[in-house]
Image: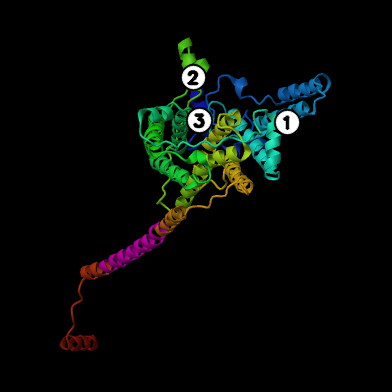
Amino acid sequence: MSSDTKDKQEIADNHIETEEFSVPNPKLLLPDKVLSNSASSIYYSGVDEISVKWLYSPHTITALVILLGFFVYSAFFLESKDPSTNAKYGFLVVVFVFVLIGIQQFRDGPFIRPHPAFWRLVLSLSIIYLLILVFILFQDKNDVRKLLGKIDNTLGIELPEKSYGDNCDLTFQNVKDQVYDIFVLAHFLGWFGRALILRDYWFCWVLSVLFEFCEYSLQHLLPNFNECWWDHWILDVLTCNWFGIWLGMKTCKYFEMKQYSWRGFNEIETTKGKIKRAAQQFTPHHWTKFEWGVTKSFKNFLAVLLMLVLAIQLDLNGFFLKYLLWIPSEHMYVTLRLILLAGASASGTSEAYRYLMDKTCKKLGTQAWVTIAILSLETIICFKYSKGEFHEPTPKKVKIFWLTIIIGLVLFALYQFALVTLFCKNKNNQTGKDKNENKIIDNEAYEPKQKKVSSKDKKKGKKNKKNN
């Protein structure tokens, strides 16, 4: 056996092949290596084509030395007598330190591109945002408004009410005003991103239509939801949303059909090839097609409903938080929240899908857990801060509509997972009985018939026995 063959056989013996990537055989590793989740563990990161090793080394000692040096510099050279400035610096440094710890020590997520550390960064920022929401929950809304005003002079000012449904005539000028709105681009990009995250046409379309009904149902609370019918269904659903979903699903199809064969930088000889490989670092390492199977089981049905509710919460919470905390739509905080939750949702949805579909996965991923907590806490804050803000009662037709939707879902679940399941079970049992009866009949048909013995033959037999 050649040395190359021996090396290949040793690698094969020391690794276990999984659906996504190769991981070391735990039986052949020391306990500390098995439990390691650091960035240096290329197998647990799923990175198997490392050529620039320093990018995937943990650098924990280097990071600690730099951090301590920064603390020393801050203690003796960054002095300010302004309490507001000191508070801002202190908060930003706390965020920086926590993020640094998270990048160094948190577990890797389901994605490895552009780098596993990037997704640990997203998780760290998600946890910080969750902690900020916990702090806000225990404050009075007026105090939070004042606090935001001290942080940014443009905040803490009551916003003017803006309605998009004052003039609903379908004229060229009205349509032009809506099309040139920055939120048209936001709609398109938002649904393009949702398609990449959810990876399901049906899911995206139901979510798109459902959100428009939510806007109809809540326009008595938020004037921002008061839009013209053609704005709801033509510009939003059939134009921006549809094009974003279509392009997103086409992108998913491209990544799904693509053949993945990665090479390290050192294996590429040409400069053009190296540049192309560097750009490919920002594309997926592999692609998993999502098949949610809403009618497959009651568990899947509930999971998809929960995903729909969380996706709706993500959008509605943004509108209500802006209104309640007096944050303009064009403010940086709104954009940063959307970017953070987009990254958290991408990783969290992948973890949730694996938890739902993979029977060997017994634990919900950290990013999915944190994202659900964020959206739930935002909703709780919105309900708390809504006291005394909204005086218009919910229209009767809105209550009837959503009650009908709920009853319809309950009836569908009873039909699909109770009646149909029971009918199929009885049918299978009946089919099994028929098969057993047919087997018995077939056995009787193939058994050789025994010849009947007459009384005369019996007497002759007895005489023969006596003579013998």
Which residue matches tag 2?
279
Dots 3, 1 in contact, CB < 8 A = no
In the picture, the quarter occupied by the C terminus is bottom left
Of the residues under marks 3 and 1, which one precedes in the sequence? 3
Q: Amino acid at mark 3?
A: Gln
Q: Residue 355 in the image: x percent, y percent?
A: 52, 45
Number of marks present in the image shown: 3
Classify 250 as above or below 439.
Answer: above
Of the residues under marks 2 and 3, which one precedes in the sequence? 3
Q: Amino acid at mark 2?
A: Ala
Q: Secondary structure at mark 3?
A: helix
Q: Magenta stretch: dominant SS? A: helix
Q: Determine the CA span between mark 3 and mark 1.
A: 53 Å
Dots 2, 1 in contact, CB < 8 A = no
Q: Is residue 302 visible?
A: yes
Of the residues under marks 2 and 1, which one precedes in the sequence? 1
Q: Residue at x 23, y 89 (%)?
A: 466
Q: Marks 2 and 3: which is nearer the front?
A: 2
Q: Determine the CA span between mark 2 and mark 3.
A: 34 Å
Front residue of 60/417: it is: 417
Which residue matches tag 1?
91
Front residue of 39/222: it is: 222
Q: Is residue 351 visible?
A: no
Classify 319 as above or below 294.
Answer: above
Mark 2 is surrounded, within 10 Å at the Cα level, by few (under 14), some (14 to 19) or many (20 or more) other residues, namely: few
Which residue matches tag 3?
9
Front residue of 142/58: it is: 142
- Residue 312 within the segment the image draws in magenta: no
Which mark, by number, is residue 274? none
Q: Which residues are magenta?
A: 412-438
Q: Marks 2 and 1: which is nearer the front?
A: 1
Q: Residue at x 53, y 34 (%)?
A: 342
